[in-house]
Amino acid sequence: MTFSPDGTILATASDDKTAKLWNTETGRLITTLTGHQDWVFSVAFSPDGTTLATASHDKTAKLWNARTGELLATLVGHRRPVRSVAFSPDGTTLATTSDDDTAKLWNARTGNLITTLTGHQDWIFSVAFSPDGTTLATASHDKTTKLWNAITGTLITTLTRHQHWIYSVAFSPDGTVLATASAKTAKLWDIATGKLITALTGHKGPVFSVAFSPDGAVLATASDDKTARLWHRRD
């Protein structure tokens, strides 16, 4: 689930093949987005809040008018389920990741494919743009994270120090550090060099999600061990 940039709408995704938009003040349903033929895994608002992207097990992503619920475009090209979606900071590009081992960049206004990012050897679970929109990070079942030039689609570097699947990635607000989540650990990486800064250990189960505080000083991790932890960033 995710909030719209202005906080007035909550978007949720479900295995009932729909996404829903909710009024955050009243808790009432605004509209139900129907059209996917299988589970909806992920939702993301464009930075201006006018468009919602959805990722589905039906091998497609869709773009919707976030105010009216009107379907704007269906993005077809992945050969297996689409796991995650993310808008670039300027809202012009949408990134999708899939179980077909690829990520794709799409024109968010037209729905046209820009390029396909190949190199992972297994499912890609998560994707994130750097705050300045120049770098894309992808997290994969192949135990690696890759950094890509978000403009050209070329590979910058591969981060290889995890021993298990990587579930989630997040950039620090200043764009200098990347957090990755894997089995029982999260790691912090220097974006400029690609070098590991530190490993955060203590969870007793897989770490499924990571997120930085708005000031970048604190990292939150969520785990299958039924706990969430807060870590003070030291780099």
Image: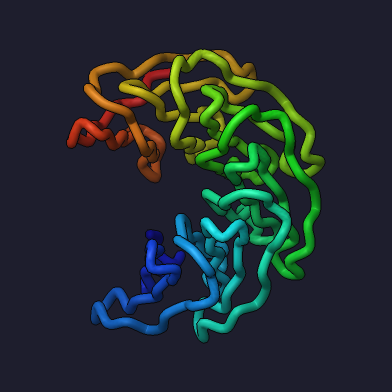
Is 18 in front, or is 23?
18
Is 215 in front, or is 37?
37
Residue 107 location (% of width, % of height) = 75, 61
Whether residue 134 sits left or right of residue 144 in the image: it is: right
Is 17 in front, or is 25?
17
Q: Can you tell which quarter of the image residue 180 is in?
A: top left
Residue 75 location (% of width, % of height) = 68, 63
Looking at the figure, which quarter contains the N terminus? bottom left
Residue 182 location (% of width, % of height) = 40, 26
Q: Is residue 87 above or below residue 179?
A: below
Q: Is residue 95 above or below residue 210?
A: below
Which residue is drawn at the image coordinates 54% and 32% (left, top)? 140
Whether residue 28 sits left or right of residue 186 in the image: it is: left
Q: Is residue 66 above or below residue 226?
A: below
Looking at the figure, which quarter contains the C terminus? top left
Which residue is drawn at the image coordinates 58% and 42% (left, top)? 99
Q: How many marks?
A: 0
Which residue is drawn at the image coordinates 60% and 45% (left, top)? 98
Residue 202 location (% of width, % of height) = 24, 18
Which residue is drawn at the image coordinates 56% and 64% (left, top)? 53
Extreme-left residue of the structure? 226
